[in-house]
Amino acid sequence: TTTLTVTNGVSADSTFSCKVSSTEWNIVDEKTLITLNVFAVVFEDKTVLTAQEQTITCSMTGLSETATVVWNNPTGSVITSTQDDYTIDVGALSAGAQDSILTIGRVSADSTFSCKVSSTEWNIVDEKTLITLNVFAVVFEDKTVLTAQEQTITCTMTGLSETATVVWNNPTGSVITSTQDDYTIDVGTKDDAGAQNSVLTIGTIKLAALPTTGTFTCVVTSG
């Protein structure tokens, strides 16, 4: 018996050949074709906001029949769609691929979920893939202010591993830039504790033009 071990570098179904020569049997380069069918599980870690529903996806390729997928929570317990704050879409097979999606109502801290795949076609049981959700939070405070004084509003982000991108919108929904009259933006940078403060300064001219109540929006992108 001769064995070829393929450690990496095969990303698609491939056919190898084994050529045998034997003086005893009077054969030269007797060729046998051997097909290696490739199956893959693909995932992506995410950086997410605590206040929003989140989804994570376990993507499988190289299938000819639907795989069985089990999701586990950060403590290792099996998740079911009957549990509060979880929804599972196991996914259907399409063009050899299957996406299983776990929807999570709320995550308050960095968490690692696992996607376990079983396939009779590939003779695998509970092949586990770990998927990490890195969580950050955005904190703000409503203010009652005087129009005769310059005012600042702050968008505070915590739990960051890198500086986030921040965009401020005015009450009409338009993007504010620091080149606009009577607005100043300090986007801020992440500190050693993983926090970042973005500060919007609004001058008296803009304040005087606001209605009784004006809602500004801090739009944060991270990861």
Image (tube, grey):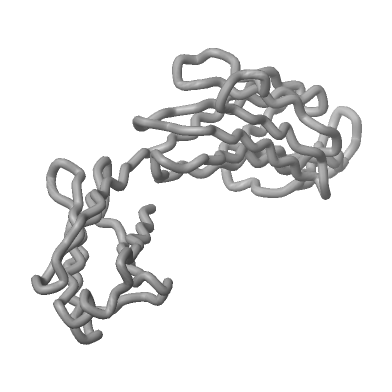
Q: Is residue 18 visible?
A: no
Residue 196 visible somewhere in the drawing = yes
- 160 or 154, which is in the foreground? 154
> Is 127 drawn above or below residue 208 in the view shown?
above
Residue displayed at 64% across by 37% down: 101
Instruction: Look at 24% across and 43% down and name the residue there.
Output: 158
Expressed as whole percent of the image width and height from the top left, the position of residue 59 reads: 65, 41
Q: Would you place residue 3 above or below residue 220 in this image?
A: above
Residue 2 position (above or below residue 201) = above
Q: Which one is in front, 112 or 217? A: 217
- The answer to whether residue 1 is left or right of residue 157 is right
Query: Which x, y percent locates residue 74?
Result: 45, 21
User: Does residue 21 lie above or below 78 as drawn?
Assistant: below
Q: Is residue 214 left or right of residue 45?
A: left
Of 63 and 179, the residue lying toward us:
179
Quadrant of the rendering where the N terminus is positioned: top right
Judge by depth and name the residue closer to the eye, 147 or 27: 147
Tell which residue pokes out farthest to the front in this image. 212
Q: Position of residue 93 (x, y in %)?
A: 82, 40
Quadrant of the rendered image containing residue 109: top left
Residue at the image point whose x is 61% and y is 34% from the top: 102
Q: Residue at x 59, y 27 (%)?
A: 86
Using residue 170 as the reference point, say whether residue 179 is left or right of it: left
